Image (cartoon, rainbow, N blue to C red):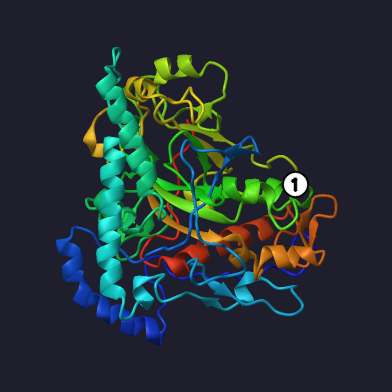
Amino acid sequence: NESGAPLPPDPGTAEEGCPQLSGRMFGAALFIIAVFGLAAALQSFGPVRSTHELKPAVQIVNGAADHQQHQHPVQSNRRHGSISIAAGRSQVHSTDTVHVHSDVMPLKTPSDKTLLTGGQKLLDFVARDVDKSARLREAAASAAPLQIVEHVSSEEAQKALRARDALSQALADGYGSVLPAYNALKRSVEHEPKVANCRPPRRKVLSKCVCPAGRAWSGFSCVSLQKPGVMTFYMYRAQSDAQYPMSNVDMADLAGVMFYLHNEVANSINQTAKSRFNGITRILRWLVTMRPTAEVVNQGRTFMPFVAFDSGRCTTAGCSALWSQYGFAVGCQEQAEKAEGGYAYRPPAYSGLTAGAWFSLPGPCPDQISGHKDGSCLVRYPGGSCSNISESEKCTYSVDYAGEIYLDELEGITDFASWQSVGHKEYSKVSDRGNGTSFWNFRNSTVWCDRRLQRVQKLFKQRYPTLPRDLPRPKCA
């Protein structure tokens, strides 16, 4: 222990793809078998239904936060007070002393949170999730024209605006289910081998043995692909109380988003009364399927350079020139191995990566601020996003919601506003400690930072047990 302080609780080492089920969960899992035929007939199956209200975005830009105001932010009509089951949040009970870690907190999940703990409403949730996911994908497909058009008619412009509005309306109830993510991941590994003893750097993914994204098995090791094709991996986003399409935004890998949360969001200097910085409340996880454009591949790259988005607009100098040079490709930028302030977050050793990363995802009309994107711009500059990457060669990425966890739950805080009102603070850079919690203590300790990353992965695995614990990103190159 580098700090000499007590270590954070061990989050455990559950085997990938083999969650340990309680008796209650096991009984419910048997019930799922009866439902499987229905779900398969509807061309969708997955483990989890998230009913969280979803919230505004914060950009991960060089360690700073840029508040994302989407063109049509959908405000929730439900209150997120302490921990309301009606709001779809997991119940977490704190102790009187407050000096607790999440791992010693009981993690209770409402029956409508997951198919594995379903019950009498299980069939309804399967049907609802399939219907919700289908509506979201239909709206996303119509909102993402895939060809750059020089001359746009008024009819085409109006159609693009209607499609955009339809997508915003489809998100009014949240991002839907993780069923599409499960199905997309299943398709991505269908040709991978089954290996009884799958060892790093390969990972067990839905019973298959898979190299990290951007690499392939040579028979002896995972080797980088000279011309990478379609790749699938996780991205993460710190977010607040609005939902909108995941395009014209910046995201991060897990190490990157935890650095941002530690450096900006948990930092007491940036917090206001009853609210974290920019209203951040949770970590969203996304399954991203991407492929580089021909322009990117021809330059021997996997990603275009990272660009910063603020309020739906690219704010990096020369954005238009970058689109012309690389197309609407996903951008990537790695952090220094010891990020600003000495934060010791790093990807797991089996990934072959040494630092966190930011990603940029250009969407429709990326050079205009949200609220000022007219129909003509949406048609002429469609961006790289689409609902299914197989739709067109012009499509460079698709994203599928893969779950979320709340910061209160992660830290073992029952209700942040009440907890903060009595003088507690999540973290101070000066003392390198919190007051009322030790979760964010010791930013320079690789042991503490690794345990925090593992805690996040464990909570995602508990809530969404049939999705992999980790899907490492490709190298930023």
106 sits left or right of 200 in the view: right
Residue type, label 1: Asn
- Residue 306, can we see it? no
Q: Is residue 373 above or below residue 247?
A: above
Look at 28% across and 12% down and name the residue there: 151
Look at 45% across and 68% down and name the residue there: 463
212 sits left or right of 65 in the view: left
Q: Is residue 169 above or below residue 383?
A: below
Secondary structure of residue under mark 1: helix
Look at 49% across and 23% down and name the residue there: 368
Q: Relative to the observer, which residue lies in front, 391 or 66? A: 66
The image quadrant where one finds the N terminus is: bottom right
Q: Which residue is mark 1?
A: 270
Picture coordinates of residue 230, whole percent (x, y): 31, 38
Q: Relative to the observer, which residue lies in front, 359 or 350? A: 359
Q: Relative to the observer, which residue lies in front, 9 or 271? A: 271
290 sits left or right of 476 in the view: left
Q: Relative to the observer, which residue lies in front, 383 or 228? A: 383
Give the number of callouts. Answer: 1
404 sits left or right of 120 in the view: right
- Residue 101, can we see it? yes
Look at 26% across and 59% down and name the residue there: 130
- Check the image and name the residue furthest to the bottom: 23
- Check the image and name the residue furthest to the right: 431
Q: Is residue 103 above or below residue 451?
A: below
Q: Quadrant of residue 315?
A: top right
Picture coordinates of residue 141, whole percent (x, y): 27, 38
Picture coordinates of residue 45, whole percent (x, y): 25, 62
